[in-house]
């Protein structure tokens, strides 16, 4: 970016790049994460990555679309995912069958799939019947067909 364009775009910004904000925090998120770490034995359920600080507690049925707090905190409504899989799953680029088979959206270019380590051999093992309704919701509402 040309320096003059940058200066013009930033000229009218406030004198500081920080602001104080009031935030709504998800109560129980730490409990949900702890339950998922236990349930998935501290590993990404897709890749097997075992670095807890990198793993994301991902809701299958998104938090905002849950009908109750019980759904939001239900361990069966969660997957423990490495950051790349979390972003892909939350964005609807990937989903999973009830058998754990990886489903990839046709809208995700093949080159992106390769760059992100997506392989048709990837699978979630140890899904429970209690996961199925949440996965069905994800496939029907979130997944980009």
Image (spheres, grey):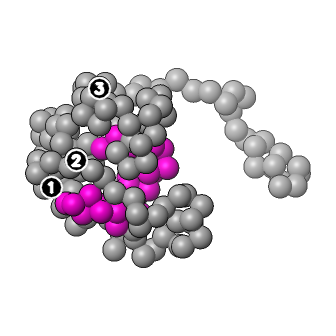
Who's the residue at 47% across and 31% down the image? 51
Query: Position of 83 compared to 97: left or right?
Result: right
Q: Which residue matches tag 2? A: 126
Q: Answer whether residue 93 is magenta in the image.
A: yes
The residue closer to the viewer here, 45 or 143, is 45
Marking on residue 34: 3
Q: Which residue matches tag 1? A: 132
Q: Which residues are magenta?
A: 79-103
Residue 93 position by quadrant: bottom left
Q: Is residue 34 above or below residue 10?
A: above
Q: Which tag, 3 or 1, sits closer to the chain's start? A: 3
Who's the residue at 43% across and 29% down the image? 52
Query: Position of 136 compared to 142: left or right?
Result: left
Q: Position of residue 20 (x, y in %)?
A: 52, 23
Residue 98 position by quadrant: bottom left
Residue 92 is at least partly visible in this image: no
Residue 123 position by quadrant: bottom left
Who's the residue at 30% across and 63% down the image? 101
Marking on residue 22: none
């Amino acid at each position: 970016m040309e320096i003059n364009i940058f200066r013009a775009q930033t000229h009218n910004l406030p004198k500081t790049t920080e602001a104080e904000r009031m935030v709504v925090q998800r109560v129980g998120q730490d409990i949900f994460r702890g339950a998922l770490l236990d349930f998935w034995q501290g590993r990404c359920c897709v890749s097997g990555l075992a670095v807890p600080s990198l793993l994301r507690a991902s809701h299958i049925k998104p938090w905002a679309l849950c009908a109750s707090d019980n759904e939001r905190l239900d361990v069966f409504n969660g997957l423990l995912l490495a950051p790349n899989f979390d972003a892909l799953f939350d964005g609807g680029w990937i989903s999973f069958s009830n058998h754990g088979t990886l489903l990839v959206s046709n809208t995700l270019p093949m080159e992106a799939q390769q760059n992100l380590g997506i392989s048709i051999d990837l699978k979630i093992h140890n899904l429970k019947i209690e996961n199925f309704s949440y996965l069905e919701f994800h496939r029907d509402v979130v997944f980009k067909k």
